[in-house]
């Protein structure tokens, strides 16, 4: 039973992780940190019965860089930029890591710096970090000590395109991903943008085109799989829902494709996957299919002669964050990959 | 055409006022202040086309306590405690005032201090202030230079009880008002409480019993009308909607009442009122009847032998705040009371 | 491992049951019926991956009143009035029953007929039926072959009052329950009342006072526990949320009570209960505490000298229906009561 | 003051029209029909105070095809296919018509038949019908006796593209419109699709690609303006909001464009338009900018070297239906185009 530490337990991803682990048969949380709420309990912050005590992050470290309370694995639910230092410290102490920030997702430190506007302070760890998309990198994750858990938007887009790109079926390098996300993706910290009255009955595009930081990891993976640089547009929109991302993705394929053939290709590619659901030709993915689960639903429609649409949906906090992190941990410790994740 | 100044234009009540006045045939906004956003325009803060310029509150005052830009009336959409000083300054300059804060609603400075925890710095103005519930105090409002616009919860509860109390029809001094409000009532400033994810799919009671400050003005008016102290319980709940208050009010009456008789009493009491809608016996008020309008819907149900329920609904920002403020201004300037308010 | 049949699997309670049982370690669904959708699969009706086949209810019965596919227990998620005939048939076949309709909740057939407007066709079973509120009737449920699963509103109100009434602490026979429910409580069948546009941004009281049918089972239990007839008002409201019921309940107690004493009383009364959460004095129940769980949160506030408020919250489809049905089944089969229910 | 008849007053567009006309200084509703609710009043169907009587459509016709109650103009808020016969009857009686159905939007009866699956029974009127997009066809509307009010999705897409296409600035014939609509667009009739629980917290694509009927009128106008057939993909999504459409439109332009140049082009093209708001370069359209108003907000972003995004937003029931119909009537009767429409 892995002993677990959580750094940054009080944000939405941390809270989701605590909820998932509460129903995980082989997990024991040995500490959970919070900078701002140390000394309180989860039940002081969230309407919930979890009386998990929150401790100051400094207090978990004992002399000589050892953990005061030994843990086998640590989840980092910290902000981008804040995570890398703490991860380095954990790795130095021999603790295995699942990092939910963006700090170890990009293989190239220069790309990281361009998109995230600060230098990478642990570039030496980038080489050992594995991008935690288990449907693509399962063997590497199982061997890894540092898993960079994918971003929420990237998860929805990458799983929707992987079989097409890996098979080199694109007929044009242009890909447009029109994505819509629930508000929990913006984090728990109050802001004008997340005020109920601003979001409710509204729909707002933001950072559309080539501005949103998640484009960096989307392009890294897509370009690698396609073996060539693509021309990607990524348009996020803020939806008046709490959970969920739906991505409507426009691609042009080589001649000869149909929705039926796409369903067949994906069904084969994702055979055996517990969490990817390829929908039949007559159905489209929707948030209702996935919210509060670790599912990714993928579906297809025709949009012109060789133009097709892939629609995918995930719960941004579960499959797009903490729910994806748990199978990654399960893989790292030889546990059943689906443990702790309701079907 | 009254020249209008708005103090504190960038909160939700200020914005609502600007929207209403934009469609008012006889109103001209000569200045609008904002402490935090001076120099910007409304369209910088809200998704709207109003390019009304926001100025620093200090800048509207010229030498000798005169207004730099003369105005006939000023609306104060400031926080409780902040308003009274500014109102005093405006009154000293001879400007008529509609104050949307609580600072002049309570006739007794000691009661104000008990509920709002700070001393009243302009108690000499309390005597001339008129409680701006136009259905009850219309003649006084028309003569007044200082109208204290009622609170949102009080408006919904007072209009639902006025005919019963004025007629001395209560059979018990116990009144329970179970009220439910949309989130805009909590103001525009972001907080954990108003974060979309905390409110959405939720319903939270808060300050229930005898805690919420609005109880002070509710009791002041009810006790006066009843001619005796009542035993009032007031329970606010936060609803996952942007606009609206619905109050479900439990009363015990003298023997002999029925819903039909209540409808008759209220219809007579509110005859000629443009904004109070007494519903027929078979219907109950709902938010949908009132949101985005200046209506107050009032309705009735039987709850036992002499036990009855009055249900009232208003839009908290319109009839409960800015929409109520505009007829008050209309009355003060001899204009048609309904001017600027869609039917 | 109990073999399970579900009658009426395609309504919201049926679907919730299927979801819960999919994660129950000791349950096997052997058939699921649907009058309107026989021949289809759950995944044809709901955005979900469950390919459970729906069969015609007639087809589950073989010769001589035996089940074609043997089952140990049947859940009935049928409409009031439709359920009793089918339940009788199941009991005659020796199948144990958890009935989610109202048909076996009232011990008196005449009371049933008055509230539900049709005769009871299996009154002989009323004597053996146990009201399935496990916190109160656990031993009887464990022995029972016919459990009448409580209604959603009654669950929220009864658990909020049980310790007070059992202890005979009321100071007045008057109880007012102001309840607010999400839309799933109205069932899956489309109607004007459940149209998104009618519900969204709205709040509507309905059947308030002494009209709603759930009052019958609320009174049956409360009067029994209090040992005297009470004067109950019950006011349901339709909330713009999918899941959840919050009941704000007004009571007058004997002299000498405080919130702290109430917390103590309830904490003792519900000691050992997995699903009832008594909140500390400073906190109030909210939907967020309970939705998507089998929890009932109970909390307290003071409303006057001897006037108190009890606020309780449940998920209407889980603790108020299918989530309560599963522990009832667990109890009937000697399984761990919490099996299949995430904490 | 035009005397107005409304055919089909009880759907959402009919109700919106009644609300708008209630605040129109120069309009008088002389009759309003309803097949299903004849004999009732609007206040029986909607939570509103409008006691407009609903009459049977047959009853408005007197002998010899004359109107029993003379009207100058009739609005038709009937379903596609039902409208054309009634419109013909009205035109034969000399009544001017604003038709909110699709029956007279397509200039070619064969195209109509292909998309709407029934024959056109009044093809002789197609020649005189004017497509009621006042920003493009204002002079023709002013002269017309039969205005075909544009569909909601087409309004949002066409206004977002008109200046670009009219100026022949496209660099590729491919246009992708990813549109998101509130639920009122699906009409008032209850269905599984519009059930609150199915829509709430959900987002569903439907009829995406080249399936939705509105594509026919989108293509008719775009191809005409571009002077060449385009390759249009149109993907509607159902949003969990009551009102509003946001269209995110992907185009490739000739070399040399920038967001600033687009803003300039559109600002010039829509100079003098009351209802089209071209946003500055740093802002994007959102539903909040437009709901409950007759505004269309248009905005721009860059998506690649020559790839751009146009985002437009309208209220589907106002600018996309009844709010657009009122200026059309105003134009037909020489009234101020903005009369009855709050700014």
Image (cartoon, coloured by chain):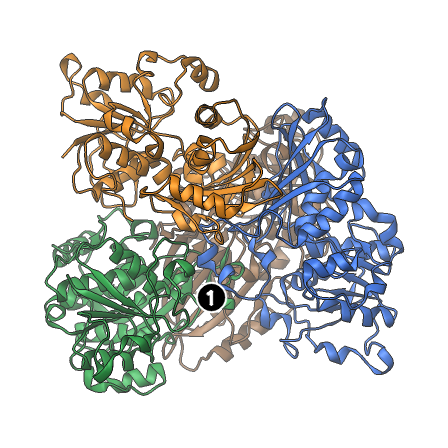
Chain colours: A orange, B brown, C green, D blue
Quarter the N terminus of chain C occupies? bottom left
- The residue wearing badge 1 is B311
Query: Between D306 and A63, which is closer to the camera in this rendering?
Result: D306
Specify the quadrant of the image occupied by residue B61.
top right
Q: Position of residue A210 (x, y in %)?
A: 55, 26
Specify the quadrant of the image occupied by residue B57.
top right
Describe residue D76's horizontal placement relative to residue A144 as left or right.
right
Numbered disc 1: what chain?
B
Query: Between D32 and B217, which is closer to the camera in this rendering?
Result: D32
Q: Secondary structure at mark 1?
A: strand
Q: Position of residue A193 (x, y in %)?
A: 49, 35
Q: Residues within 10 Å of mark 1 (few under 14, many from 20)?
A: many
Total number of numbered discs in the rendering = 1
Query: Which residue sits at x=44%, y=23%?
Result: A224
Q: Position of residue C123 (x, y in %)?
A: 23, 86
Q: Position of residue C147 (x, y in %)?
A: 20, 72
Query: Which residue sits at x=38%, y=36%?
Result: A320
Describe residue D109's horizontal placement relative to residue D213 as left or right.
right
Specify the quadrant of the image occupied by residue D12.
bottom right
Is residue D1 visible from the viewing direction of this image? Answer: no
Describe residue A15's horizontal placement relative to residue A159 as left or right.
left
């Amino acid at each position: 039973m892995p002993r677990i530490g959580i750094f940054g337990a009080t944000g939405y991803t941390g809270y989701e992780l605590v909820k998932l682990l509460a129903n995980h048969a082989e997990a024991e949380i040995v500490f959970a940190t919070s900078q701002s709420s140390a000394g309180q309990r989860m039940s002081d912050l969230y309407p919930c019965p979890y009386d998990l005590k929150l401790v100051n992050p400094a207090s978990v470290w004992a002399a000589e860089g050892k953990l005061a309370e030994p843990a086998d694995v640590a989840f980092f639910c910290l902000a981008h930029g804040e995570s890398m230092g703490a991860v380095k410290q954990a790795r130095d102490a021999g603790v295995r890591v699942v990092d939910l920030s963006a700090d170890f997702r990009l293989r190239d430190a220069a790309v990281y710096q361009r998109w995230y506007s600060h230098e990478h302070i642990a570039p030496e760890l980038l080489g050992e970090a594995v991008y935690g998309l288990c449907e693509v990198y399962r063997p590497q994750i199982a061997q890894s000590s540092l898993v960079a858990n994918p971003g929420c938007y990237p998860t929805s887009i990458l799983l929707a395109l992987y079989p097409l790109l890996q098979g080199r079926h694109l007929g044009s390098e242009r890909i447009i991903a029109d994505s819509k996300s629930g508000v929990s993706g913006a984090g728990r910290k109050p802001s004008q943008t997340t005020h109920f009255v601003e979001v409710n009955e509204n729909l707002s595009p933001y950072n559309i085109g080539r501005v949103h930081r998640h484009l960096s990891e989307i392009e890294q993976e897509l370009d690698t799989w396609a073996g060539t640089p693509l021309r990607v547009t990524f348009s996020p929109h803020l939806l008046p829902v709490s959970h969920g991302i739906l991505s409507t993705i426009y691609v042009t394929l080589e001649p000869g494709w149909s929705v039926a053939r796409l369903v067949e290709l994906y069904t084969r590619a994702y055979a055996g996957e517990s969490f990817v659901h390829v929908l039949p030709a007559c159905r489209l993915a929707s948030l209702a299919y996935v919210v509060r689960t670790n599912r990714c639903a993928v579906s297809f429609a025709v949009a012109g002669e060789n133009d097709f649409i892939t629609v995918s949906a995930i719960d941004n906090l579960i499959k797009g964050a903490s729910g994806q992190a748990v199978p990654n941990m399960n893989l790292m410790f030889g546990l059943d990959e689906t443990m702790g994740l309701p079907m």
